[in-house]
Image (tube, rainbow, N blue to C red):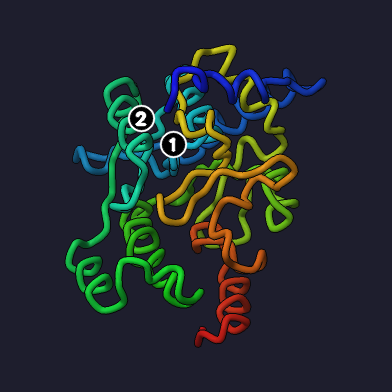
Amino acid sequence: MSNTSQGRAIELNARASGDYVIKLAEAKAVLAQAAAQYAADPGTSESSLVSKVTQASSLGAEDVVISHLINSMRLDIGIFVLQTGALHKETLALLERFKADSRAPVTVYEPRSEAVVQFVAREGKDAMYKSIALRKACCGIRKMEPLERALKGKDAWITGLRREQSGARAEVPLVDTSEARTKINPLANWTWGDVWHYIQEYKVAYNPLHDAFYPSIGCEPCTRAISLGEDFRSGRWWWEDETSKECGLHVKADDAADSDLAAGVSA
C-alpha cells in the first residue's frame, strides 16, 4: 500500500447523511439493548458468566465501527473473528492491532486444518473458481464450520449488515428474530458515508485495503477492488452470478436451499 493512498477511503467517502446523529443514537440504543437483553446468566461458575451475544467481525469498515462502539460504551459483548487461513496480509496485520487494543475480549476461530488440507489436496488451491458448489464447499470449511463454534451457546449475534450493501440486503432489519438465533444489525440504516464519517471522527483503525477501493473484504482469492459505479459487493466472487454471492453466513435456511438448487447442488 503506497503512502499516497493512505486515507483515501476517508477522503472519498466520509460524508455523513442528514440524519446521521439519529442513526448513531439508534445504533447505540440497539447495542445497549442487546447487552442488557442477552447479559450473562448469573451462576456459581465462571463459565456461566458469559454474555449470550457476540459480535462477528470481518474487520471491515462496518465491523470496526461496531467494535469501537462496543468498546467505547464498555458493553459486555465479546467479539470474534474468523481467520480463514486465506486472508490478506493487511487484514491479518489489522487483526493483531485490534486484539491488542480492544477492551472487549476478541476470540479468533480458525478452520480445522485437516479439513483444509484434505480439500486443497482433493480439489486444488483454486477450487473456488471451478464451480459455485466448490466455492461454497470452501466457504463451508473456512467460514461456516468455525462460525458454528463461535456461535455455540449464543442466543444472538451482531453483524455489520447494511441495507445499502446489496439488493439481497435491501430489507435488513435492525433486529432480525426470524431464525432461532437473533441477528442484530445496528448499522442497518447507515450509509457508506455515515460509516466513514464515524471512522474519521473517532480515528478508528481500518483495513488499508479500503484505500485501494476494496469496500467489501473477504478471503484474498475471492476479493478484488471495484471500479466506479460498481456496487459494494461486486468485488466479492466477481466471477459468479449475483444471486449466488453469499458465503452462507448471512443466508437464511430457505434461501440457502433455493440457492443450492439453482446451482445444481443438493440442498
Residue positioned 23% across, 69% down in the render: 115
Q: Tell me: residue 74, above or below residue 264.
A: above
**Left or right of residue 82: residue 57:** right
Q: Tell me: residue 223, above or below residue 194.
A: below
**Left or right of residue 176: residue 108:** left
**Left or right of residue 118: residue 14:** right
Q: Nearer the viewer, residue 14 or 73?
A: 14
Q: Secondary structure at mark 1?
A: loop
Q: Tell me: residue 239, above or below residue 210.
A: below
Circle 1 crowding by C-alpha within 10 Å: few under 14, some 14–19, many from 20: many
**Left or right of residue 27: residue 205:** left
Amino acid type of the residue that numbered disc 1 sits on in the rendered structure: Leu
Residue positioned 67% across, 23% down in the render: 12
Q: CA distance from mark 2 to mark 1?
A: 8 Å
Amino acid type of the residue that numbered disc 2 sits on in the rendered structure: Leu
Q: Please tell me in which quadrant of the rendered image residue 52 appears.
A: top left
Where does the image place residue 220, in percent across and percent down from the top left?
A: 40, 50
- Is mark 2 in CB contact (under 8 Å) with mark 1? yes
Q: Please tell me in which quadrant of the rendered image residue 178 appears.
A: bottom right
Q: Secondary structure at mark 2?
A: helix
**Along the polypeptide, which appears first: circle 2 or circle 1?**
1
Residue positioned 74% across, 51% down in the render: 170
- Can residue 65 be seen at all in this image of the molecule? yes
Q: Nearer the viewer, residue 41 or 158?
A: 158
Residue with the mark numbered 1:
59
Residue with the mark numbered 2:
94
Where does the image place residue 125, in percent across and percent down from the top left?
A: 31, 66
- Can residue 41 be seen at all in this image of the molecule? no
Q: Residue furthest right?
A: 18
